[in-house]
Every structure is written in C-alpha cells, then in structure tokens.
Image (cartoon, helix red, strand yellow):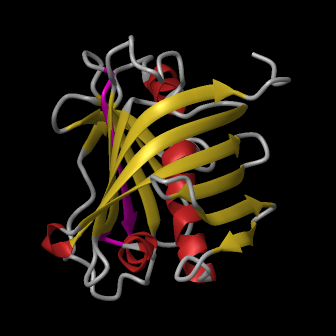
Amino acid sequence: MRRFFAAAFLVVPLVLAAGCAPLPRLDPAPPGRAAALSRSCDALFPEGKWRFIHTVRATLRGDRQSVMTGVTVIDSDARSIHGVMMTVEGLVVLDAVYADGRMTLNRGVPPFDSKSFARGMMADIRLIFFKPDGPPEAVGIDARGRPACRYDNGPDRTVFIAVDPETGNWTLRQYRGRRLARTLDARAGDPSTAGAGAPVPERLTLTAHGFPRSYTLNMTLLEGERIPGDTE
C-alpha cells in the first residue's frame, strides 16, 4: 500500500501530458467589478497560520485506492508548510517542511523517504492552500457565467480560478504551457461538520493530469484550527 501511495504523490515532468487545450475563455469584468472579483479569488485561500487534518483517498489508474491521514500546518505570510502523512493506524510515514523556498525531509519511511516524493507533496499543498503569486493577470466572467481570475505564475505556468457565487464551490486549473496539469475542485460542506469555520472547503478533489503518473486525491476536512498566537 505504501508503494502505491508514494506513487500517487510523485510529480514528474509532464512530457507526455494528457493533450493540449486552449486556456478557458475569460470575458472582461463588468465596469467597476474588477477589484471585487480579484478579492473574491484571493479570499478562497487561508490567511495566517493554520493546521488542517484531512482524510486523503488517493486513486491511481485502474481505480486502485489507498487511504491515509494528512496533517498540514501552513503560514501564508511566510509561505511555509509542515506536512505529515500517517497511516490510518497512526504511523508517521512522512514528515517534511517547506520554508524559504527549500524542502527539508525530517522523516521518511521507505518508500516515502524519496525527496522527489516529498517535493511533489509540497507542490500539491502549495497549490491547494496558497493563493497564486501576485495579482491576477486578468479578471472577468468565464464561459459558464462564473466570476473568474487568471494568474501568470512564471514561465509556462498559468492558474485559472472560477467561483460559483450561489454555492461557494470553486475550481482551480493549473496549466503548463497549453497543457492542463492540475485540476482542483473545492466543495463547501455542511456548516455542522468538524471543519466548520475553517477557511477551506470541506471537500477537495485534486486531479493530476498526465501519463503515466496521473492520480486523484480526494480530501475530506476533519479539523481546521488557527494556530494560537496568530491574529485575526
């Protein structure tokens, strides 16, 4: 099971990605709405220091699945991460830190001792919890009528976010050039759940598009807690 789950998080160059596609259409924002649309995209991501606990179900090609518990501590200001993966029995198989642009592997039980595995996990966590760098390159309305933002995150990296104003659900797409690399679907949950009040949705589905390392991570929020000492 461990070997399977490690493969689920590996991020490899998408040399053989799942085809090219045009970037989503983005019509200009209505007059006077651009600033508000930009803020609505930024507000999707937690600010300050938080600790989240998720049940993570990974699915590879062939519908093979594995379940673990993920504990993630983030600091949005420092853009730092402390990520821990545990088996359902509570065995820590991976403990890694990302800070100052560098990744440190504190603990890794084979095959989770791979630095490439830890880097891949950190890349996915950054995509999920940190808002894209800089202001949006463009804001407007997507083809489905949803408020949307497009960010330029470096050479051949584009992030597109669209928000459903009625449900609060939102979708993030990361492109590398014209290739769709990641899709993140966020679903708001019942306010009575364990994660109520946390600044992240109850359910997240991250899909990595590529061959042969495509995978899907279904994450259910168990707990979300602001770290003591952080100010509102």
Left or right of 44 in this view: 165: left
Residue 129 lies within the magenta run: no
Residue at 52% in and 16% down: 197
Left or right of 33 in this view: 47: right
Q: Residue furthest right?
A: 229
Left or right of 62 in this view: 220: right
- Residue 225: image quadrant is top right
Residue at 47% in and 24% down: 40
Residue at 71% in and 70% down: 107
Q: Main secondary structure of the magenta part?
A: strand
Q: The N terminus lies in which quarter of the figure?
A: bottom left
Q: Residue furthest top?
A: 192
Q: The C terminus lies in which quarter of the figure?
A: top right
Q: Residue furthest front?
A: 89
Q: State the image coordinates of residue 111 (x, y, percent, origin top left).
A: 52, 82
Q: State the image coordinates of residue 57 (x, y, percent, origin top left).
A: 33, 54
The magenta segment: 168-179
- Residue 3: image quadrant is bottom left
Tell how many labels. 0
The answer to whether residue 152 is above or below residue 172 is below
- Residue 19: image quadrant is bottom left
Residue at 73% in and 61% down: 97
Q: State the image coordinates of residue 12 (x, y, percent, origin top left).
A: 43, 82
Q: Nearer the viewer, residue 195 or 33?
A: 195
Q: Nearer the viewer, residue 30 or 76?
A: 76
Q: State the image coordinates of residue 138 (x, y, percent, origin top left).
A: 44, 42
